[in-house]
Amino acid sequence: MLVIKKYSMRRKKVYEFHKNWNNKSDGKIQVSLEVHSTYLFSREWLIKSANIAKELEIGIQIHILETQRERDESFEKYSASPVELCMECGILDVPVIAAHCVYLSDNDMDILKAKNVSVSHNPTSNLKLGSGIARIPELIKRGINVAIGTDGAASNNNLNMFEEMHIAALIHKGYNKEPGYISAAEAVAMATANGAHANGQNGINGMIKKGLKADLIILDMDKTHICPVNDPIAAVVYSAQGSDVETVIIDGKIVMENRNLIYLDEELIKAKVRETAKRVIL
């Protein structure tokens, strides 16, 4: 009875949240279900979560195979990898963004490809936690959509997408001793168009194209660490920093101009963050 009651309460909260927030702010808010991982969710709750996502016709975000330990424990408990378990429980029957994917087997990759799962590559987090290096070049060769993510602030302090592009474009070259792996253009695509694809936004945003949402950033390319700009794409990936972004436009509306936030009080936000940090740390 307790499990049934708990499930009913959680299901109700998910439905209420979906009703209140999905497609709000002119469609900029898209609700998906967060299923943390196969080691925090039992088989029963994986199945229940998959059913909720199917009922609401939304996607799922989940951490998959971030560590070797996760893989080992999954086989000990279920005689299956986390990817295989997700397939058995119906998780992969809806659009899925799988974070990390460091310890995928060839069979896992085949499943992700067959189920059209998108992978969120989080290189900084994987390096900071010593998790390992994902087989991103192989995923790309197999035609699996790979986007770039940051993971949370606890495992990636600055959440800097420029740094993620930079590292993603370097680490696989060095690790595989192959300078052709992950070109600057591929890194930019992973951070833009591939991310839009992962979030079900194909044909809506992710590219600068007529008819798509005007989601743009303007960089100051006259900085000394970027000059001269011979190849704009390479300059963005290998030289530019997040601090070089001077203007941000979302759906045609300027939200930051000349590095000044238009609709938010930056000083107030920083003050509140410092106060919250004291309570959390102490």
Image (cartoon, rainbow, N blue to C red):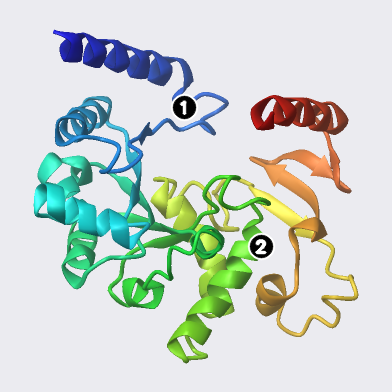
Taking the spot 47% from the left edge, 51% from the top edge, the residue there is 196
Q: In this view, does 214 lie to the left or right of 228?
A: left
Q: What residue type is labelled 2?
A: Phe
Quick check: can you spot residue 84? no
Taking the spot 15% from the left edge, 40% from the top edge, the residue there is 90
Report x, y in % for residue 169.
56, 76
- Does label 2 or label 1 sit earlier along the sequence? 1
Viewer-nearest residue: 107 or 264: 107
Considering only vertical position in the picture, is 178 above or below 278?
A: below
Considering only vertical position in the picture, is 211 above or below 35?
A: below
Residue with the mark numbered 2 = 162
Q: In the rendered view of the protein, which quadrant contains the C terminus?
A: top right
Considering only vertical position in the picture, is 282 above or below 259?
A: above
Report x, y in % for residue 28.
54, 34
Task: Name the image quarter holding residue 238.
Answer: bottom right
Report x, y in % for residue 135.
36, 73
The Cα–Cα distance between marks 2 and 1, rounded to whole angstroms, is: 28 Å
Quick check: can you spot residue 233? yes
- Asked which secondary structure carries label 2, the reply is helix
Q: What residue type is labelled 1?
A: Asn
Residue with the mark numbered 1 = 23
Q: Nearer the viewer, mark 2 or mark 1?
A: 2
Packing grade of label 2 (10 A; few <14, some 14-19, many >=20) is many
Packing grade of label 1 (10 A; few <14, some 14-19, many >=20) is few
- Asked which secondary structure carries label 1, the reply is loop
Q: In this view, does 181 lie to the left or right of 63?
A: right
Q: Are marks 2 and 1 in contact (CB under 8 Å)?
A: no
